[in-house]
Protein backbone atom coordinates (compact mmCIF):
# COMPACT_ATOMS: atom_id res chain seq x y z
CA UNK A 1 0.00 0.00 0.00
CA UNK A 2 2.86 2.42 0.78
CA UNK A 3 5.87 1.69 -1.46
CA UNK A 4 9.00 3.81 -1.04
CA UNK A 5 12.59 4.03 -2.20
CA UNK A 6 15.56 4.71 0.12
CA UNK A 7 18.70 6.26 -1.34
CA UNK A 8 21.76 6.12 0.90
CA UNK A 9 25.55 6.33 0.93
CA UNK A 10 28.25 5.00 3.22
CA UNK A 11 29.61 7.83 5.33
CA UNK A 12 31.82 5.69 7.61
CA UNK A 13 33.25 2.55 5.94
CA UNK A 14 34.74 1.21 9.17
CA UNK A 15 31.40 1.27 11.00
CA UNK A 16 29.60 -0.09 7.95
CA UNK A 17 32.00 -3.08 7.61
CA UNK A 18 32.87 -3.95 11.18
CA UNK A 19 30.27 -2.58 13.63
CA UNK A 20 27.11 -3.83 11.95
CA UNK A 21 26.35 -7.35 10.82
CA UNK A 22 24.57 -7.40 7.47
CA UNK A 23 24.08 -3.60 7.13
CA UNK A 24 21.76 -3.89 4.12
CA UNK A 25 19.39 -6.13 6.03
CA UNK A 26 19.56 -3.71 8.95
CA UNK A 27 18.75 -0.81 6.63
CA UNK A 28 15.71 -2.62 5.21
CA UNK A 29 14.38 -3.59 8.63
CA UNK A 30 14.90 -0.13 10.11
CA UNK A 31 13.34 1.64 7.11
CA UNK A 32 10.23 -0.54 7.44
CA UNK A 33 10.04 0.16 11.16
CA UNK A 34 10.46 3.91 10.61
CA UNK A 35 7.77 3.95 7.93
CA UNK A 36 5.31 2.01 10.10
CA UNK A 37 5.95 4.46 12.92
CA UNK A 38 5.33 7.53 10.76
CA UNK A 39 2.38 6.15 8.80
CA UNK A 40 0.72 4.33 11.69
CA UNK A 41 -1.09 7.35 13.15
CA UNK A 42 -2.25 8.74 9.80
CA UNK A 43 -5.41 8.12 7.82
CA UNK A 44 -5.25 6.64 4.35
CA UNK A 45 -6.23 10.02 2.96
CA UNK A 46 -3.20 11.63 4.62
CA UNK A 47 -0.91 8.87 3.36
CA UNK A 48 -2.06 9.55 -0.18
CA UNK A 49 -2.10 13.35 -0.06
CA UNK A 50 0.96 14.01 2.16
CA UNK A 51 3.62 11.75 0.68
CA UNK A 52 6.37 14.39 0.81
CA UNK A 53 5.68 15.19 4.45
CA UNK A 54 5.73 11.50 5.39
CA UNK A 55 8.98 10.93 3.48
CA UNK A 56 10.74 13.77 5.33
CA UNK A 57 9.62 12.50 8.73
CA UNK A 58 10.54 8.88 7.89
CA UNK A 59 14.02 9.99 6.76
CA UNK A 60 14.56 11.77 10.08
CA UNK A 61 13.45 8.75 12.14
CA UNK A 62 15.47 6.27 10.06
CA UNK A 63 18.65 8.34 10.21
CA UNK A 64 18.37 8.65 13.97
CA UNK A 65 18.05 4.86 14.39
CA UNK A 66 20.94 4.14 12.01
CA UNK A 67 23.18 6.57 13.89
CA UNK A 68 22.26 4.93 17.19
CA UNK A 69 23.28 1.57 15.69
CA UNK A 70 26.59 3.04 14.42
CA UNK A 71 25.80 1.69 10.96
CA UNK A 72 27.96 4.19 9.06
CA UNK A 73 25.04 4.82 6.68
CA UNK A 74 23.77 8.26 5.63
CA UNK A 75 20.25 8.51 4.20
CA UNK A 76 20.26 10.76 1.15
CA UNK A 77 16.52 10.72 0.53
CA UNK A 78 13.36 8.68 0.90
CA UNK A 79 10.94 8.86 -2.01
CA UNK A 80 7.33 7.87 -1.48
CA UNK A 81 5.91 6.26 -4.59
CA UNK A 82 2.34 6.85 -5.64
CA UNK A 83 0.04 5.21 -3.12
CA UNK A 84 -2.87 3.23 -4.48
CA UNK A 85 -6.03 2.38 -2.62
CA UNK A 86 -7.01 -1.32 -2.75
CA UNK A 87 -9.76 -1.94 -5.30
CA UNK A 88 -12.46 -3.16 -2.86
CA UNK A 89 -12.26 0.03 -0.78
CA UNK A 90 -11.81 2.49 -3.66
CA UNK A 91 -15.52 3.55 -3.80
CA UNK A 92 -15.62 4.17 -0.06
CA UNK A 93 -12.38 6.10 -0.22
CA UNK A 94 -13.75 8.26 -3.03
CA UNK A 95 -16.84 9.06 -0.97
CA UNK A 96 -14.75 10.00 2.04
CA UNK A 97 -12.47 12.14 -0.08
CA UNK A 98 -15.43 13.90 -1.70
CA UNK A 99 -17.04 14.52 1.69
CA UNK A 100 -13.77 15.96 2.97
CA UNK A 101 -13.53 18.32 0.01
CA UNK A 102 -17.16 19.40 0.47
CA UNK A 103 -16.50 20.04 4.15
CA UNK A 104 -13.51 22.23 3.34
CA UNK A 105 -15.53 24.11 0.73
CA UNK A 106 -18.40 24.63 3.17
CA UNK A 107 -16.04 25.95 5.84
CA UNK A 108 -14.37 28.25 3.32
CA UNK A 109 -17.74 29.56 2.10
CA UNK A 110 -18.95 30.10 5.67
CA UNK A 111 -15.81 32.09 6.51
CA UNK A 112 -16.20 34.15 3.35
CA UNK A 113 -19.85 34.90 4.15
CA UNK A 114 -18.88 35.78 7.71
CA UNK A 115 -16.16 38.16 6.55
CA UNK A 116 -18.67 39.88 4.26
CA UNK A 117 -21.52 40.04 6.76
CA UNK A 118 -19.64 41.31 9.80
CA UNK A 119 -18.35 44.60 8.27
CA UNK A 120 -21.83 45.31 6.84
CA UNK A 121 -23.49 44.64 10.21
CA UNK A 122 -20.94 46.79 11.99
CA UNK A 123 -21.51 49.60 9.50
CA UNK A 124 -25.28 49.42 9.99
CA UNK A 125 -24.83 49.37 13.77
CA UNK A 126 -22.55 52.42 13.60
CA UNK A 127 -25.09 54.30 11.49
CA UNK A 128 -27.89 53.42 13.90
CA UNK A 129 -25.83 54.54 16.89
CA UNK A 130 -24.86 57.81 15.21
CA UNK A 131 -28.48 58.48 14.28
CA UNK A 132 -29.59 57.83 17.86
CA UNK A 133 -26.84 60.05 19.21
CA UNK A 134 -27.83 62.82 16.78
CA UNK A 135 -31.49 62.53 17.78
CA UNK A 136 -30.61 62.60 21.47
CA UNK A 137 -28.37 65.64 20.99
CA UNK A 138 -31.15 67.45 19.10
CA UNK A 139 -33.64 66.71 21.88
CA UNK A 140 -31.18 67.91 24.50
CA UNK A 141 -30.47 71.14 22.61
CA UNK A 142 -34.17 71.81 22.11
CA UNK A 143 -34.90 71.10 25.76
CA UNK A 144 -32.08 73.38 26.85
CA UNK A 145 -33.37 76.11 24.51
CA UNK A 146 -36.91 75.77 25.88
CA UNK A 147 -35.56 75.86 29.41
CA UNK A 148 -33.51 78.98 28.68
CA UNK A 149 -36.51 80.77 27.14
CA UNK A 150 -38.73 79.80 30.07
CA UNK A 151 -36.20 81.07 32.61
CA UNK A 152 -35.82 84.34 30.70
CA UNK A 153 -39.60 84.73 30.50
CA UNK A 154 -40.04 83.95 34.20
CA UNK A 155 -37.39 86.49 35.18
CA UNK A 156 -39.12 89.11 33.03
CA UNK A 157 -42.49 88.18 34.49
CA UNK A 158 -41.16 88.39 38.05
CA UNK A 159 -39.89 91.93 37.40
CA UNK A 160 -43.12 93.29 35.84
CA UNK A 161 -46.08 90.94 36.11
CA UNK A 162 -48.76 93.30 34.74
CA UNK A 163 -46.69 94.42 31.79
CA UNK A 164 -45.74 90.88 30.94
CA UNK A 165 -49.35 89.67 31.15
CA UNK A 166 -50.53 92.43 28.82
CA UNK A 167 -47.73 91.76 26.37
CA UNK A 168 -48.59 88.06 26.29
CA UNK A 169 -52.28 88.89 25.79
CA UNK A 170 -51.54 91.20 22.87
CA UNK A 171 -49.13 88.74 21.28
CA UNK A 172 -51.78 86.02 21.54
CA UNK A 173 -54.38 88.22 19.86
CA UNK A 174 -51.90 89.15 17.16
CA UNK A 175 -51.34 85.48 16.36
CA UNK A 176 -55.02 84.56 16.64
CA UNK A 177 -56.80 87.27 14.61
CA UNK A 178 -55.31 86.44 11.20
CA UNK A 179 -56.74 82.94 11.53
CA UNK A 180 -60.30 84.11 12.24
CA UNK A 181 -60.98 85.85 8.92
CA UNK A 182 -62.84 89.16 8.51
CA UNK A 183 -65.29 90.25 11.22
CA UNK A 184 -67.76 93.16 11.08
CA UNK A 185 -68.84 94.80 14.33
CA UNK A 186 -72.02 96.90 14.03
CA UNK A 187 -74.38 98.60 16.38
CA UNK A 188 -77.28 96.41 17.46
CA UNK A 189 -79.66 99.34 16.96
CA UNK A 190 -78.66 99.78 13.33
CA UNK A 191 -81.69 99.10 11.13
CA UNK A 192 -80.25 99.21 7.66
CA UNK A 193 -77.01 97.57 6.61
CA UNK A 194 -74.94 99.05 3.89
CA UNK A 195 -75.15 97.07 0.62
CA UNK A 196 -71.44 96.42 0.64
CA UNK A 197 -71.84 93.95 3.50
CA UNK A 198 -72.22 90.44 2.10
CA UNK A 199 -74.38 88.94 4.83
CA UNK A 200 -74.59 85.57 3.08
CA UNK A 201 -70.87 85.02 3.07
CA UNK A 202 -69.08 82.65 5.42
CA UNK A 203 -67.58 85.58 7.26
CA UNK A 204 -69.59 86.40 10.33
CA UNK A 205 -71.25 89.55 11.56
CA UNK A 206 -71.00 90.39 15.24
CA UNK A 207 -73.47 92.64 17.00
Image (cartoon, helix red, strand yellow):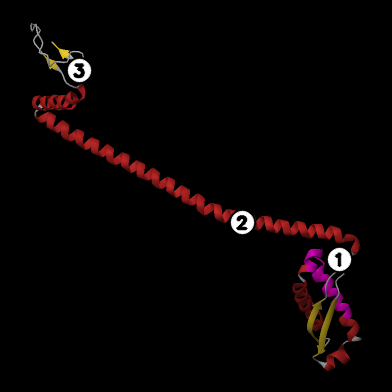
Q: Is residue 123 visible?
A: yes
Q: Is residue 69 visible?
A: no
Give coordinates of residue 177: x percent, y percent.
17, 24
Q: Residues within 10 Å of mark 3 (few under 14, many from 20)?
A: few
Classify mark 3: helix, strand or loop. Answer: loop
Left or right: residue 102 versus residue 142 is right
Which residue was labeled with disc 3? Answer: 203
Which residue was labeled with disc 1? Answer: 85
Residues at circles 2 and 3 in contact by the CB criterion of under 8 Å: no
**Direction bottom: furthest residue:** 14
Quadrant of the image occupied by residue 17 = bottom right
Classify mark 2: helix, strand or loop. Answer: helix
Pick the residue in front: 84 or 157.
84
Residues at circles 1 and 3 in contact by the CB criterion of under 8 Å: no
Give coordinates of residue 202: x percent, y percent.
22, 17
Residue 46 within the magenta-colored segment of the rendering: yes
Pick the residue in front: 72 or 129.
129
Q: Sequence-wise, which precedes: disc 2 or disc 3?
A: 2
Which residue was labeled with disc 2? Answer: 111
* Region in magenta: 28-48
Give coordinates of residue 48: x percent, y percent.
80, 68
The image shows a total of numbered marks equal to 3
Pick the residue in front: 195 or 23.
195
Residue at image position (82%, 86%) is 8
Q: CA distance from mark 1 to mark 3?
A: 104 Å
Residue at image position (20%, 17%) is 203
Position above or below: 108 against 142: below
Q: CA distance from mark 2 to mark 3?
A: 74 Å
Amino acid sequence: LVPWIVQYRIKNPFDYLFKVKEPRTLLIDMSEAAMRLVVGDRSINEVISKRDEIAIEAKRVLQMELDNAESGVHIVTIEMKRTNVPGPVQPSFNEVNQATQEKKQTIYQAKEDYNKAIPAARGEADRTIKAAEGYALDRINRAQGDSTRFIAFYNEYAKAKDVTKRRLYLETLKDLFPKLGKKYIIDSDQKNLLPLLNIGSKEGVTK
